[in-house]
Image (cartoon, grey):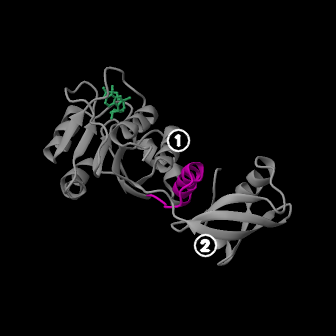
Amino acid sequence: MNLALLSEQDLLDDHRARLTGRRRDHLVDVLRAGEGDTLPVGVEDGPMGTGTVTCLTDTSAELRLELDQSPPPPLPLTLILAMPRPKMFRRVLQTVAALGVKDIWLINSYKVEKSFWQTPSLQPGHLRENLTLGLEQAMDTRMPQVHIRQRFKPFVEDELPALLRDRPGLVAHPGTSTPCPVHLQRPATLCIGPEGGFIPYEVEKLEEAGCQSVHLGPRILRVETAVPVLIGRLYDLCG
Ligand code: SAM
């Protein structure tokens, strides 16, 4: 936790907040902070700055806030991800939130196991928890939006075209002839397949909608590795 992300419930007023649970424990056990110490804080979807610990108890930490900074710019990327297996899904969510992706679409695909859609990680509270961990890691406050679409064809036919308006669409697909572009200076939409990959019919449908298939070289990467490699290749993360 490089920044404590404050929700509305944490705010006592415009200048004070109270941390409990995981964030209070992290502050004490990992950061070894005490009264008078400061730590980076940010308000969800709002400004960032510092919090000075004014009162520490066994269950809570009260902070005086100075919020004078903006969060880092979001990545102009819409990410379309075939639903990964739950354990990987949680890690991928944290990673993409840390990388600055704000628009995430979880879609079905032939090789997505039906049981993946039953995971509690898809419940709003769990989604938020994992996204928060990513934002806290990267020191960002803007909460990503997650859209869940459990039917591939209606998504591709009815919704994908709008996500490709005025921006290139890419399908990461091993074995295609076009290398993934680098250093994009504009928004883009990126589709990433499931562990077993997109089937030819799905690639065809994505291409029909306007996407171009691209590869990352001959090595087949796990989804959790392919995601940051693709994003790091598409955008210059150093600003
Ligand atoms: N056997 C599957 C295939 O050939 O599509 C492997 C799928 S891979 C484990 C999971 C996803 O990560 C792929 O669908 C793709 O989106 C992305 N990916 C992994 N390695 C890639 C590569 N070398 N080039 C492009 N995409 C890749």
Circle 1 packing at 10 Å, graded few (<14), some (14-19), many (20+), is some
Label 1 secondary element: helix
Residue at 25% x, 56% y is 163
- Is residue 47 in view? yes
Q: Is residue 156 left or right of residue 123?
A: left
Label drawn at residue 49:
none
Q: Earlier in the sequence, mark 2 or mark 1?
A: 2
Mark 1 highlights which residue? 91
Q: Indicate the position of residue 205 as horizontal and vertical percent values.
A: 17, 43
Asked whether 189 falls inside the magenta stretch, the response is no
Q: Looking at the image, in which quadrant does ligand 1 appear? A: top left
Q: Is residue 64 left or right of residue 2?
A: right
Label 1 amino acid?
Arg
Closer to the camera, 223 or 55?
Answer: 55
Q: Indicate the position of residue 131 as horizontal and vertical percent values.
A: 53, 53
Residue 13 appears in which quarter of the rendering? bottom right
Distance between mark 2 and mark 1 Cα atoms:
26 Å
Q: Residue furthest bottom?
A: 13
